[in-house]
Amino acid sequence: MKGIKFIGTGSYLPEKTISNDDLSKIMDTNDEWIRQRTGIGQRRMAIEEGCVDLATKAAISALENAKLKPEDIDVLIVATCTPDNYCPSVACMVQEKLLAVNAVAFDISAACTGFIFALKTAESLLKSSEYKNALVIGSEVMTKLINFENRNTAVLFGDGAGAAVISKNDFENGIKDIYIKTDGSGAGLITMPALGSIKDANFEDKEFTYVSDNTRDIFMEGREVFKFATTIMVSMVKDILEKHNLDISDIKYVVPHQANIRIIDYAAKKLKVSSDVFYTNMEEYANTSAASIPIALHEMNAKGLLSKGDNIILLGFGGGLTFGSALITW
Ligand code: COA
């Protein structure tokens, strides 16, 4: 049985940094509140770049790291909830920019769990076909949807992209398991209605005068999402450990979606493990939704934190509600 393994990682973060102090100049917030409640210190903001630009740059970085050419890619999936357009997909535009001429390319929408959903889809395609290499990207331009008058969510998000190349071969190590799930009963807990096609075009009268509106926003029931995130993180770790007959001490790192340091500290406490086992970088980049896990993974890879044989768990959760985990032996 052939294994499927990560053979390269990459990321791209836009240059512009927005600190908590910068935000406090345009809304009623402050660095102390944001750091204490979330662990976030700053975020990146794409100014003249879009989701496709970020995704393409992260993809180039991952391909270089994997030592593959764009034409070696058979499957190209972009996880995003902030696409530049509904049609064409971000993935098709990245395919064109990279000249990944042999790939089949499409997007996946699963909010902050998008990367895990895309990874599962890519893995399934590799397993079930002649495809050999997949490029899986998480790319988000959250700041383009933020309403900077809504301090409840404006302080939480940032822009960025992360990517990974996975490949099928006679590998012993690699992806051991990926689990994904959804719970639509919580669909109203996190919403980004601005781009939704459900919203009627805003015409004021029979003369079809268009009224520009300011509905771009991210709405979140923060406390409910907090409860969901802590509960699901703990149960996902316990479930995947039990299924593979492992103990938390067998895991070198848990790489969680980078939403909030308090969620992670809570999960670590419940799992009776040091918070250091959870890799975090939300202080620098805030919550980059589907991009946060691959950005973290690339950072860890680039820092040399991952050695052959290390067991790691990826953990995603977010709007939908969506959630998922992956067990990987590096
Ligand atoms: N700056 C300053 N004050 C703020 C603020 C901000 N950016 N946002 C909210 N506040 C205020 C509120 O207005 C409220 O004031 P009040 O007590 O006078 O009414 C107070 O802070 C507490 O607000 P609350 O929403 O209850 O705070 P909280 O402790 O629940 O923290 C979150 C808010 C969003 C940080 C927290 O709920 C959270 O992290 N939830 C999960 C979010 C998440 O991870 N989402 C992504 C999932 S993918």
Image: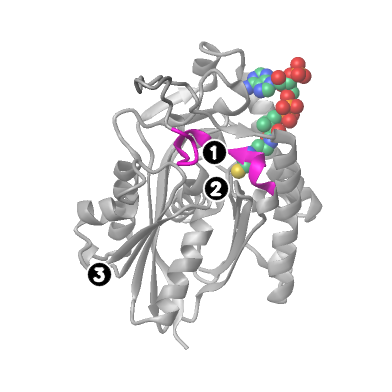
Q: How is the image coloured?
A: one colour
Give the residue at mark 3.
Answer: 72
**Could you tell me which residue is drawn at 72 percent across and 43 percent down?**
265
Mark before the other along the chain sequence, 3 or 2: 3
Identity, as a three-letter code, of the amino acid under mark 1: Asn
In this orientation, which residue lies closer to the viewer: 5 or 139? 139
Ligand 1, image quadrant it occupies: top right
Q: Residue furthest bottom?
A: 1
**Could you tell me which residue is drawn at 79 percent across and 49 percent down?**
269
Looking at the rendered structure, the number of numbered marks drawn on it comes to: 3
**Could you tell me which residue is drawn at 39 percent across and 77 percent down?**
168
Label 1 crowd bin: few (<14), some (14–19), many (20+), radius 10 Å? many
In magenta, the rendered stretch is 186-200
Q: Quadrant of residue 135?
A: bottom left
In this orientation, which residue lies closer to the viewer: 154 or 314? 154
Mark 3 and ligand 1: say if the CB distance to the nearest ligand atom is below 8 Å. no
Mark 1 and ligand 1: say if the CB distance to the nearest ligand atom is below 8 Å. yes
- CA gap between label 1 and label 2 equals 9 Å
Mark 2 and ligand 1: say if the CB distance to the nearest ligand atom is below 8 Å. yes
In this orientation, which residue lies closer to the viewer: 66 or 139? 139
Give the residue at mark 2.
Answer: 112
Vertical order, 229 against 174 (above or below): above
Give the residue at mark 1.
Answer: 287
